[in-house]
C-alpha cells in the first residue's frame, strides 16, 4: 500500500530529473559548439560582460583585445557568446521617419497653448 502512495511522486521526480539533465546537456553542447567555431577577429562577450576581439586562439586559452593595443589572455570557458552585428535596413528607417513626421505634424495642429492659468490670484 505504501508503494502505491509514493509511486506517482517517484515518477514525477524521475521526469523532472530527466528533463533538467536533457536541458543541461543541450546548453553544454551549444557552448562547446561556440568554442569550436571561434575564429580570429570575432567580437565576443565574456561571462563578466567584457566585449573584446579575438586576436589568438589556443587549445584552452584565447587572447582578447579589449582596447587598441591592450591584449589579455582568457580561458575559453569565459567566452559567453559571439557579438553579431545587426544590419539595419535604410528603407525601413526612412518609412519610420516619414510616419513619425506625420504624427508630429498632426499633434502640433491639435495642440493648444495655455496663456493664463485660471487658478491664479490677482491682487485687488
Image: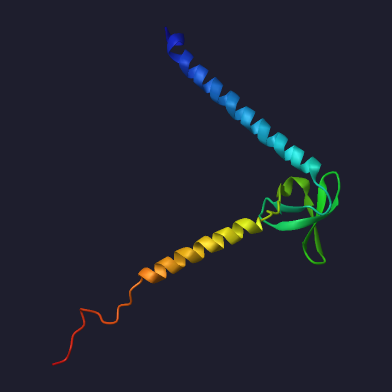
Q: Position of residue 36 (x, y in %)?
A: 80, 40
Of residues 91 and 121, the one drawn nearer to the viewer in this rendering = 91
| Residue at x-position 13% and y-position 93% | 124
Colour option used: rainbow
Left or right side of 23 for 70? right
- x then y, percent, for residue 94: 60, 61
Q: Which quadrant of the structure image shows residue 87?
A: bottom right
Residue located at (76% from left, 38% from top): 33
Q: Which quadrant of the figure contains the N terminus?
A: top left
- 123 relative to 111, above or below: below
Q: Nearer the viewer, residue 5 or 16?
A: 16
User: In this figure, what is the number of numbered marks?
Assistant: 0
Residue drawn at (74%, 45%), measured in percent from left and top?
77
Q: Nearer the viewer, residue 19 or 81?
A: 81
Asked if residue 118 lies left or right of residue 28, the reply is left
In screen coordinates, is 86 left or right of 57? left
> Can you name the residue that lies furthest to the top here?
1
Q: Which residue sits at x=25%, y=80%?
A: 117
> Percent x, y for residue 21?
62, 28
Q: Is residue 93 above or below residue 84?
A: below
Task: Identify the residue at the far bottom of this view.
Answer: 124
Where residue 34 sits, quadrant-wise, is: top right
Q: Is residue 1 above or below residue 115?
A: above
Residue 23 in the image: x percent, y percent? 62, 31
Amino acid at each position: 500500500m505504501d508503494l502505491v502512495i509514493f509511486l506517482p511522486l517517484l515518477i514525477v521526480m524521475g521526469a523532472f530529473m530527466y528533463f533538467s539533465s536533457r536541458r543541461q546537456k543541450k546548453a553544454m553542447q551549444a557552448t562547446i559548439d561556440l568554442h569550436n567555431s571561434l575564429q580570429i577577429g570575432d567580437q565576443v562577450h565574456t561571462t563578466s560582460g567584457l566585449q573584446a576581439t579575438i586576436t589568438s586562439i589556443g587549445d584552452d586559452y584565447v587572447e582578447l583585445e579589449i582596447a587598441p593595443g591592450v591584449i589579455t589572455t582568457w580561458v575559453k570557458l569565459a567566452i559567453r557568446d559571439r557579438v553579431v552585428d545587426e544590419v539595419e535596413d535604410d528603407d525601413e528607417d526612412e518609412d519610420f521617419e516619414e510616419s513619425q513626421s506625420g504624427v508630429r505634424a498632426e499633434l502640433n495642429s491639435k495642440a493648444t497653448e495655455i496663456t493664463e492659468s485660471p487658478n491664479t490670484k490677482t491682487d485687488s
